[in-house]
Amino acid sequence: MIPYDFEYYRPSTIREAVHLHHQLTQQGKQPLYYSGGTEIISLGRINIQYTGAVIDIKRISECLALTYADEKLMLGSALTLNELYDSKTFPLLGESAVGIADRTTRNKITLGGNICGRFIYKEAVLPLLLTDCNLQIALLNEIREVSIHQLFHQTLHLKPSELLVTAIIDKKFIDMPYVVMKKRKQAAIDYPLVTLAALNTGKEIRVAFSGVCSFPFRSKSIEEVINNRHLPVQSRIDEAVKRLPAQILNDIKASSEYREWVLKGALTDVIHQLGGEYLAN
């Protein structure tokens, strides 16, 4: 049980949701947008997060989009992880998300909830970073479209009143060769020690990471060395690890040394599975 009461609202339009958030904020109710609610419940139970009102966005059609428009794939922020996987519309995203929790929980966890959440893994964001997607963000009096690279730096930087509506992915990325690797120490639904999502665009291999550092990321510096076919594979891997944007996690699940060993093995597999012509002679 959550140890406090809160009000529940279920608007049917973007405008209604954003204006409702504004009104509730003025009333001091610290409103939160709500789609799956797993994080609100989990953190509320242990008094880490409080709200006086939740705004359920699951009746807003744009937040449930799963369609193509003008050669762009539109993915609504209220789509569940299971809906993304089962639809097979964007396999790279579906497989990146499928290892998050168990299937029952993934019926609740949504795309927006995962990438906007406070937990550090946010694995659903990895394919969005790899495909340079745009995000539709609703403000009080407008909807703007912004590159994910402008908003995502360790976490998604939105103001409390801003609503993530859709992720927009260029169709050209959908059928590109990809690899998703989740390296766990034990259970199949445990948090991974390392998750890699990688994409071969035909010109380069792109790689995004979760579980390695205390935030998910994509690094152009790491991709530069990964794609340097003049270097032997092992040299690329060693140099890539030196270019990590922060210290490797060292926690109860695994030491930083063990994670580094797992990471190096996973990167080697990525190069061999997607590299082909990129491998050094």
Image (cartoon, grey):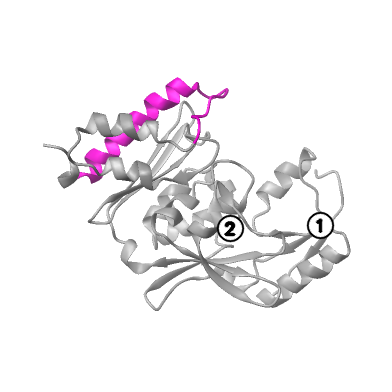
Left or right side of 151 for 20: right
Left or right side of 142 for 166: left
Can see residue 36?
A: yes
Q: Callout 1, which amino acid?
A: Gln
The spot of residue 3 in percent (x, y) is: 85, 43
Q: Residue at x 50, y 23 (%)?
A: 254
Rendered position, 238 above or below 99: above
Q: Residue at x 47, y 38 (%)?
A: 245
The magenta span reads 246-275
Callout 2: helix, strand or loop? helix
Rendered position, 151 above or below 182: below
Quarter of the rendering occupied by the N terminus = top right
Instruction: Name the residue that disc number 2 marks.
Output: 112
The spot of residue 115 in percent (x, y) is: 56, 52
Pointer 2 or 1: first along the chain: 1
Rendered position, 245 above or below 186: below
Magenta stretch encompasses residue 204: no
Left or right side of 219 for 22: right
Can see residue 107?
A: no
Q: Residue at x 11, y 37 (%)?
A: 281
**Disc 1 crowd, CA 10 A, few/some/many (<14, 14-19, 20+):** some
